[in-house]
Image (cartoon, rainbow, N blue to C red):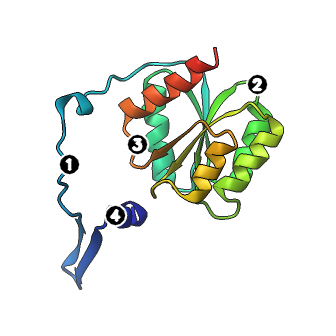
């Protein structure tokens, strides 16, 4: 969450009083961008197949799993790159696409990407991050990653991006 707030040039304030509780405020600057009605209307596209979601934040894993299973996908979860490689080795014939967090402890998103690509050079990978697209993400897209989505991820946008990538390979 901190990364998302900082990326949007905001900040977090925390006020705490013993025996009274804590108040956390997320402050973001107002946007001057005009929102067109057409930009806010995204259709949720149901799908089928299996997706491996790799993220070190348990809440993110659970939200994405709930979203994707609700529209028809089977979802495997990995909390780090090591677990992602174990799961992919075991279920590689089933997994159609990987959602890969860029910033993780133990094994980074970049290291995980290259290790997965060694196992399957044609594997479809969507990079995800709470930060805007970094030089590292651009490098991975040049090396074959299919897409980049900045967190937080909406289900309509996610469903459309996954559908486009899976249908492109048919």
Give the residue number, with chain letter if any, for mark 3: 153
Task: Tell me: 19 left or right of 132.
Answer: left
Asked whether disc 3 touches disc 1, contact meaning CB atoms under 8 Å apart, the reply is no
* Sequence-first disc among 4 and 2: 4
State whether residue 68 appears in this view.
yes
Q: CA distance from mark 1 to mark 4?
A: 18 Å
The C terminus - image quarter? top right
| Residue 165 location, quadrant | top right
Residue 78, how many percent across, how many down? Answer: 63, 46
Above-or-below relation of 129 to 37: below
Mark 2 or 1: the one toward you: 1
SS type, badge 2 = loop
Task: Tell me: 163 left or right of 145.
Answer: left
Above-or-below relation of 132 to 63: below
Residue 163, how many percent across, how many down? Answer: 50, 22
Asked whether disc 1 touches disc 4, contact meaning CB atoms under 8 Å apart, the reply is no
Q: Residues within 10 Å of mark 1 (few under 14, many from 20)?
A: few
Q: CA distance from mark 2 to mark 3?
A: 27 Å
Give the residue number, with chain letter if any, for mark 2: 93
* Sequence-first disc among 3 and 4: 4
Q: Nearer the viewer, residue 162 or 106?
A: 162
Q: How many marks?
A: 4
State whether residue 73 appears in this view.
no
Give the residue number, with chain letter if any, for mark 1: 33
């Amino acid at each position: 969450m901190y990364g998302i707030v900082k990326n949007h040039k905001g900040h977090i304030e925390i006020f705490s009083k013993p025996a009274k509780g804590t108040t956390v405020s997320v402050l973001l600057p107002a946007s001057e961008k005009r929102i067109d009605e057409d930009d806010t209307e995204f259709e949720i596209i149901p799908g089928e197949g299996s997706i491996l979601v790799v993220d070190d934040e348990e809440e993110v894993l659970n939200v994405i799993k709930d979203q994707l299973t609700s529209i028809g996908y089977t979802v495997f979860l990995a909390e780090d790159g090591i677990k992602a490689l174990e799961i992919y080795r075991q279920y590689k014939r089933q997994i159609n696409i990987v959602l890969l967090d860029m910033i993780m402890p133990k094994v980074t998103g970049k290291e995980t990407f290259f290790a997965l690509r060694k196992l399957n050079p044609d594997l479809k990978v969507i990079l995800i991050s709470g930060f805007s697209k970094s030089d590292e993400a651009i490098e991975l897209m040049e090396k074959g990653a299919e897409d980049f989505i900045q967190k937080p991820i909406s289900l309509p946008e996610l469903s459309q991006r996954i559908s486009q990538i899976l249908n492109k390979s048919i």
